[in-house]
Amino acid sequence: MQVGSIGSSCETVKFEAPNQEESHITNVLRTYVGREWTQTEEARLRESVLKMKVAAQALKGIEQTFVEEGVPVHRIIDQIYLGSEAYLRALLKRTSLGGYPEGFNPKKIITLNFIEFMGERDFDALREFAGIDHIYVPIEDSPEGFECFIPTFPKIMGEFCEALLSGEGMLIQCKMGRSRSAAAAAMCIAKIAKLTFDEANALLRSIRSEVSRPMPIFPEGYYEYTGTVPFTWCAKQYCDENFV
């Protein structure tokens, strides 16, 4: 199996979705997207969902293949990316770290951690000079952080669907791009593609190996949070209990 973003080996797959699946996708869009969408946009989104499902199925029973670590951003599906806050830092400093996926040019950034290096002027500059809409959700990598995240999930799910509909670039990030942002992306994938959280998480790990596995406790030496329940585990429990 080729290592890379979702869809790298299944672009030519033809799929006629059963009515039940069509109904699920339509219901998700009606729930989370606050506008009407065109048939072309919906077809684009359905093709993206197909890529996710095919890639998830292909991973079953396969040993985890580790991809290059230390890369700030990985493309996870079409124009949706997952990464660390390093890109945002580089953007504000007008520098380039290199190692970005080809065509990487996000029009929206969702940040799921506290960022001490940005002020209101920086947020305005992103919008005015870089044309980037920044959604800032300051949360900790903890059960309390996840509780604060839950009310914002509909907004993030809506942005995820919007990016799939429009084809415009979006980056979901946190401090390291391994726990909070990855858990949010896995929840979005699980919701739209009717996958389990474990399947969505494995899909992300096949692309970005830094992504945390859902474990009930942080492993020894993992940040300063050893001994508390990780955000990713909370996300898994939430999905298992609330997603069909």
Image: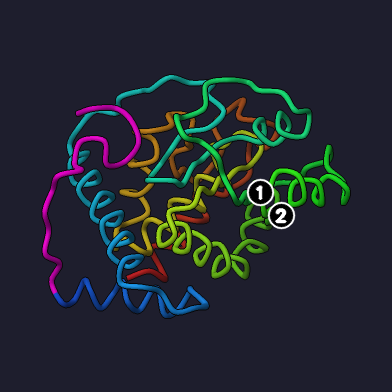
Q: Amino acid at mark 2?
A: Tyr
Is residue 112 shown left or right of residue 29?
A: right
Camera-nearest residue between 167 and 192:
167
Q: Position of residue 170 (x, y in %)?
A: 53, 49
- For residue 161, above or below residue 52: below
Q: Secondary structure at mark 1?
A: strand
Quarter of the image for the C terminus: give it. Answer: bottom left
Q: Amino acid at mark 1?
A: Thr
**Residue where numbered disc 2 is placed:** 136
Q: Secondary structure at mark 2?
A: strand
Is residue 108 shown left or right of residue 203?
A: right
Nearer-N-terminus badge (2/1): 1
The residue shown at (47%, 34%) is 103
The residue shown at (32%, 57%) is 196
Quarter of the image for the N terminus: give it. Answer: top left
The residue shown at (25%, 46%) is 56
